[in-house]
Amino acid sequence: MKTEHELPAGLDDTLGWLLAQVFQNHLSASQRALEGFPGSQRGYMVVNAAAHGCARNQIDMANQLRLDRTVMVYLVDQLVEAGLVERVPDPADRRSKMIVATDKGRVRLEEATAVLRFVDDHVLAPLEPGERAHLREMLQRLTAHYLATGGDYHEACATAAAATDK
């Protein structure tokens, strides 16, 4: 494989290192892009989930987004204060609160999503459009598999431990 920059020998085929490099590049650029968004990337994820009705309540949303429940409470408080989401009683269970995007939240979400598309374009610049689509599809499959197993990494850890016990 020919690259524009020579990768460090030994790491050039190490999945964890490669993923970390792409992730750090995307993380840095998206943090700058979301500087004015309450809660930065986490806030963006919560407003996005609220706008798309991805979770029934705050606890489900925290689990889905892999956010600590305590962090989630403070984050939602911050987003409510900014007028981007609101807590509304769940019609199916009045004791439970649903997190719903406000009109203002939907507008801010659209703006942030447009900016993040530029970040994605920057990170994926070396890839052709078809490769970009294929990468997203593969990441979606990997993520769906991970979520379907409940995010359980114990099997992978057990496999790694068995390999090192030889």
Image: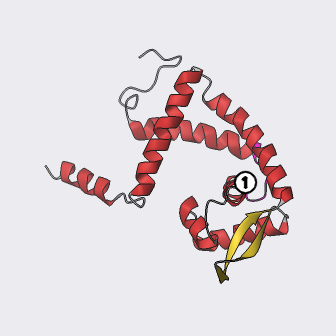
- Mark 1 — residue? 40
Extreme residue toward the bottom, this view: 95
Q: Determine if residue 102 is in view.
A: yes
Is the stretch drawn in magenta largely helix, strand or loop? loop
Q: Quadrant of residue 73?
A: bottom right
Q: Residue at x 72, y 33 (%)?
A: 118
Extreme residue toward the left, this view: 166
Return the x and y of residue 23 as percentages of the image width and height: 55, 41
The quarter of the image holding the N terminus is top left
Up the image or down, 132 lies above or below 109; here it is above
Up the image or down, 106 lies above or below 63; here it is above
Return the x and y of residue 108 as percentages of the image width and height: 82, 51
Compared across the picture, whether 59 is left or right of 140 comes to right
The region drawn magenta spans: 33-39
Q: Determine if residue 36 is in view.
A: no
Return the x and y of residue 2 as percentages of the image width and height: 45, 14
Residue 10 or residue 127, whichever sits in front: 127
Q: Residue at x 78, y 58 (%)?
A: 38
Compared across the picture, whether 148 is left or right of 89 comes to left
Return the x and y of residue 166 as percentages of the image width and height: 13, 49
Compared across the picture, whether 114 is left or right of 143 comes to right
Residue 90 or residue 134, whichever sits in front: 90
Q: What type is the residue that disc 1 sits on? A: Ser
